Image (cartoon, rainbow, N blue to C red):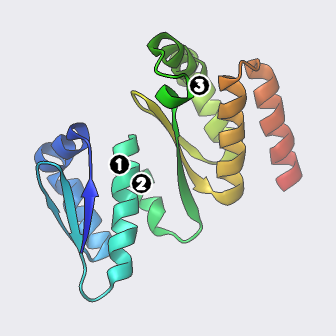
Amino acid sequence: MRLVALPKKTLNLLSKQGKKQLKELERATGAKIKVFDEGAQVEDEENPGMEWEAEQVLSALEAGFPLKIALNMLKDDFYLEKLDLMQAFRGKEAQVERAKARIIGTEGTAKQKIEELSGAFIAVGDETVAVIGKFEELKDAKEAVMRLLEGAPHASVFYYLEKRERERA
């Protein structure tokens, strides 16, 4: 049995409107998931490894990914990485908002372009940026996000991703 601490926002999604998602996650992992006030309990007596995998999917949901993308965490070659923007910018909310805006871009175009060129998925939360992808995809998307956070022009970040895409082909 594993206990997973989750924020209120995620718990509300799972306990109210997310019953269908919770059932789908249980079906995909074979684990039983119970949601409580502070988190969730994941249990699979027959295959304890699935408890960990279900926890990884819950972590992806917490980061803001839809279930369809979060379920990629059940695959052996997919990874999740979270960047804490509040920590990176020492709690300066104005800088965090600016950073999120740079990652998302006008009407989501920058985020979409990074996802398209890297093959990874990005979720921008209130205080975090999360990336799901295969190892190389995740590495490239994270590098792109880091370059944007450091102030690099979008065009140079996209050029870097296009170059990496050509190298992988």
Q: Check whether the beta carbons of the residues at disc 2 and disc 1 lie within 8 A of each other.
A: yes
Residue underneath mark 1: 61
In which quadrant of the rendered view does residue 7 lie?
Answer: top left
Q: Tell me: 66 left or right of 141.
A: left
The amino acid type of the residue labelled 1 equals Leu
Mark 2 surroundings within 10 Å by alpha-carbon count, few (fewer than 14), some (14 through 19), many (20 or more): many
Question: In the image, is residue 21 above or below residue 116?
Answer: below
List the residue tagged with mark 3: 103
Label 3 crowd bin: few (<14), some (14–19), many (20+), radius 10 Å: many
Q: Residue at x 47, y 60 (%)?
A: 72
Q: Is residue 97 left or right of residue 161?
A: left
Residue at 45%, 68% in the rendered image: 74
Please state which amino acid type lies under the numbered disc 3: Ile
Q: Of 167 and 10, which appears nearest the observer? A: 10
Return the x and y of residue 145 as percentages of the image width and height: 65, 33
Q: Which residue is label 2 attached to?
A: 70
